[in-house]
Amino acid sequence: MILPSVLFVDSVRTIQVSQETLRDLRLDRVVREIVQERNDILEYYLSPVQDEKTVRYHQEVMKDLENNEKLLEAIRKFAKDMASFHRHMKMVEQLEYEYNRKGWFLETVLIYCDAVSELSRAMNTAKLQSSGLRKFREYLKSYVRSSSFVSLKEEAQNVKLKLSNVNYCIIIKPGMFTVKPYEGEKEYSPEIEKVFSRFNREKCADEFQFDIEEGLGMSHIEARILEFVSRLYPEPFTTLDLFCERNGRFTDKVILNFEREIQFYLSYLDFMEPLRKKGLPFCYPEVSSDKSEYVEDAFDIALASGLLDTRQLVFNDFYLENPERVIVVTGPNQGGKTTFARMIGQLHYLAALGLPIPARRARLFLPDAIFTHFEREERVQDQMSKLENDILRVKDILESTSSESLIILNEIFSSAALSDALFLSKEIMKTILERDCLCVWVTFLDELSRMNEKIVSMVATVSPQDPAVRTFKIIRKPADGRSYAVSLAEKYGLTYWKIRERVEP
């Protein structure tokens, strides 16, 4: 029997993405922010797939959660209860005294049973479209009706009831105490509450504040009292002993697996929520093996998550029509070119996870790998020059690519002379075009945008009123031939104002 999963359909091929690529795209920060403390789901975010069926499978589950508020609330409640369950299980392993440990084990079983039962009731009334959640619902329905689960829940409730009916008295004397059966003695709790009512938090919270040191489990005196109680009332404690002995392994692996897998969706919904409240668009992209693509109103998700005021964000579009494969991005420095290239990598990565992407509308190709080459600062301890390092890094990328790969190159060969950079870049471009893979190339070399019909030119624009003001809009148009001259002049202090400063007395 194939066990139901809300993440996995069949064995699929994951997309090759290195840690260096995640850093270049700033997805390492995004993933850390999404996962938070749930390191057990980190692997799911590091496993994008090149499989349309799996991507749509994920999208359907996410849509069910987004479109059914009651279902989402019930699943969040289940996740919260299961978090409590895991804390209790961990605590049980650390408790020292026998009946303290067994009592908390009983409570843990009850938390599990209640959480599973409530989830099943909620899912039975939900209108589900995704095959992943429908399959799990059928499994869950069968599980809660199974004799093993029914008997586990009933037995746990009966044991709890028997223990709750145990009443006893403690006679405290200097240096000793006695435990005896309850025989109708006067209840002192109301009198004690009356005496200590003067310490009511609402009346004098600031006057009587002190910290109570929290301990794990009970003290040795409490454990001794409980031992005496078990001797006075052996029957309910024997029942507890037998319950713990029979139900050491009471959890179901499919339920636990669901609780872990569903966090993949819940954590991303939590991450998206504040961004959506700020008016940022997210969509479910169409995915296909066709390399023609389009994206409308997209933005850098890493940049957006770090901004307090997302009104500063600029949305960008792009599209590729067959036989177009390469986007060459040129324009002035600090014009948003790197952010644009990084955004394209993020969109493909998140789409391959089957998650909503930061855009209004999109259709994207699923690559078999994402490779990046972003500029690295030259370090004194490096044995190679920056140019040599760039060449070797690009060589490794080209040796690993296929016709289904995505390559993102950002300002390579900036340390080389113009003629050398142009020669090397043209040779690399020829290889990329021969491989027929997708590529985004940020460069100061306008000539690359005119090499082939497979190449699309996009330019970072400036304000028509003031060319020094960047708009951060990247538009599809021929390269204007000015970006390298401007950046070179700025780099060597050859702008009009810099020259004027030096020649004027």
Image (spheres, grey):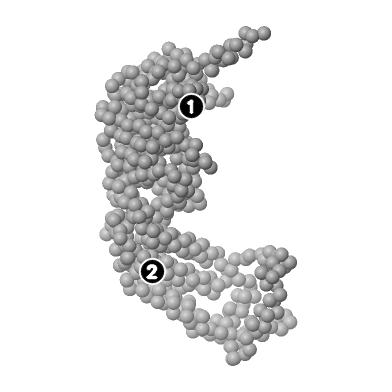
Q: Residue at x 59, y 69 (%)?
A: 217
Neighbour tally class for label 1: few under 14, some 14-19, many 20 plus, Cα within 10 Å: some
Mark count:
2
Is 318 or 270 nearer to us in this picture? 318
**Which residue is the site of mark 2?**
117
Is 498 or 135 nearer to us in this picture? 498
Nearer the observer: mark 2 or 1; the answer is 1
Circle number at residue 487: none
Say if residue 419 shows up in the picture: yes
Q: Earlier in the sequence, mark 2 or mark 1?
A: 2
Position of residue 163 in the picture relative to residue 282 (left or right): right
Tell me the distance, in whole angstroms, between the alpha carbons under discs 2 and 1.
Answer: 57 Å
Q: Label 2, secondary structure: give it.
A: helix
Q: Name which quarter of the figure residue 296 lies in.
A: top left
Vertical relation: 143 (above or below) 498:
below
Say if residue 392 shows up in the picture: no
Q: Residue at x 49, y 17 (%)?
A: 486
Q: Amino acid at mark 1?
A: Arg
**Which residue is the site of mark 1?**
470
Q: Amino acid at mark 2?
A: Ser
Is 75 or 297 nearer to us in this picture? 297
Residue 161 pos. (x, y %): 47, 80
